[in-house]
Image (cartoon, rainbow, N blue to C red):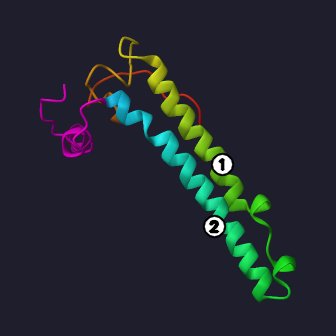
Amino acid sequence: MLAAPSHDGHWEHQRRLPGELSVTDVAAALAEPPGVLEKVARDVEESKARDDRRGERVLDDYVEAHSPASEDEWVRQTWPETRQLQAEVRELLLRGPNHPGSAVSGQAVSFLGPPPGATGVPATGS
């Protein structure tokens, strides 16, 4: 399926990605994003906390005008989105290579989306 070119531009882009990214082990490649997502979410929260500390030192009314990192809408939104994405990756990995509609099928990379005309297992969550 990945060797045959397609006229569908979106699928063609997805089909070529593994080779362009030198992905040879899909499961190993999928194991990386959860940790990266965790780091990004933590960095968002730490950045806001750093801004809060700096703002309190520089502006007398900073606390009255800004919510702390733990209550900041952007920070609070980041964590559930991170957990959802991590759960989606975990689900893909748990399905395994022999599950119908599996995202991890040997060296195939169908996790990028079904090829044109294919029917697959609908995404969970969201």
Q: Nearer the viewer, residue 109 or 33?
A: 33
**Relative vertical location of residue 89 with respect to residue 20 in this rendering, above or below:** above
**Relative vertical location of residue 71 with respect to residue 85 in this rendering, above or below:** below
Q: Which amino acid does label 1 sit on?
A: Trp
**Relative vertical location of residue 101 with respect to residue 123 in this rendering, above or below:** above
Residue highlighted by disc 1: 79
Residue highlighted by disc 2: 47
Q: What residue type is labelled 2?
A: Ser
Q: Nearer the viewer, residue 18 or 45?
A: 45
User: Is residue 92 magenta-colored?
Assistant: no
Q: State which quadrant residue 31 falls in.
A: top left
Residue 92 is situated, as x and y percent measured from the top left of the image, at 45, 26
Residue 69 is situated, as x and y percent measured from the top left of the image, at 74, 63
Residue at image location 72% in from the left, 60% down from the top? 73
Left or right, residue 19 beside residue 55: left
Question: Can residue 74 be seen from the camera position used here?
Answer: yes
Question: Can residue 114 be seen from the camera position used here?
Answer: no
Q: Tell me the magenta residue range.
A: 1-25
